[in-house]
Image (spheres, grey):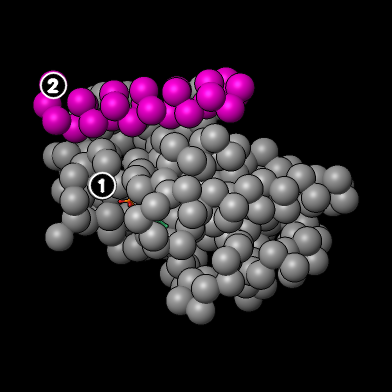
Amino acid sequence: MGIINENIREVQEKIRQSALKANRDPAGVSIVAVTKTVPVEKIEEAIASGLNILGENRVQELMDKYSALKGVEWHLIGHLQSNKVKYIVDKVSLIHSLDRFSLADEINTRMSACGRAMDVLIQVNVAEEDTKFGMKSAETAEFVDAVSRLPGLKVRGLMTIGPFVSDAEKIRPVFRKLRLLAEEIKTIGFPGVEMKHLSMGMSNDYMVAVEEGATLVRIGSSIFGQRN
Ligand SMILES: *Cc1c(COP(=O)(O)O)cnc(C)c1O
């Protein structure tokens, strides 16, 4: 086994330590292996090392890799254009990046047509950065309420992308706010809505995210190496 296997073992060990530090069960954290720009052969190594959830943020790349890789679960983690929904509804098990009602509406139309429902996470722009997609925290509960009325979607939690800074400690308040927001929404108790997932943490900040309650960490470069 090569470097990818070693990288995965290291990430798993750090997740374990961070979980224990926060009195959490490490089994409550899953790795979403982020495969953007990564060739299929390398992804196969990650699958051979035991990872079975893959995340892509571009629809075209997801479709190319989808047919080449079997026995894995795919998540769409990046900004999704409404006109691309039709290509992925039969391929992904979770969309992390629901960030507007028009997208929810399109997913609902496509899923209702086949009598199914898509699991989704609401993307929250916790730090309210202009460069990022996502709902404002203050608008999230109302948005969850609206989405919960669509039969073709099941809200399963929240997702955020931390600010791009080198000191992961600076991102901790953002992750904490996402957790508190999820707890708030859970307390309101919208029918059919579950707050079982917090998708937060990437290569630079997943340890802090796990300490703050992440259930899904989206990791690319710490597994596959730096992207060009
Ligand atoms: C690229 C990407 C990641 C992974 O980034 P790394 O820093 O390589 O771990 C996670 N989430 C999203 C939404 C991404 O686009």
Of residues 213 and 109, the one nearer the viewer is 213
Q: Residue at x 39, y 52 (%)?
A: 167
- The location of residue 72, given as percent across then percent down, is 37, 35
Q: What amino acid is found at the position of numbered circle 2 in the picture?
A: Met
- The location of residue 193, given as percent across then percent down, is 76, 47
Secondary structure beneath dot 1 equals helix
CB atoms at circles 1 and 2 under 8 Å apart?
Answer: no
Tell us which disc is closer to us: 1 or 2.
Answer: 1
- The location of residue 181, given as percent across then percent down, is 72, 53
Answer whether residue 35 is visible to the viewer in this image: yes
Query: Is residue 19 highlighted in magenta?
Result: yes
In the rendered image, which quarter is residue 10 located in? top left
Q: Residue at x 19, y 55 (%)?
A: 227
Q: Residue at x 36, y 23 (%)?
A: 13
Q: Say which mark, if any, is on residue 221.
A: 1
Point out the tag, 1 or 2, that comes first from the N-terminus: 2
Left or right: 154 as drawn, with respect to 80: right
Secondary structure beneath dot 2 equals loop
Q: Residue furthest bottom?
A: 130
Q: Say which mark, if any, is on residue 35.
A: none
Q: Is mark 1 within 8 Å of ligand 1?
A: yes
Q: Residues within 10 Å of mark 2 (few under 14, many from 20)?
A: few
- Report which residue position mark 2 lands on: 1
Left or right: 207 as drawn, with respect to 21: left
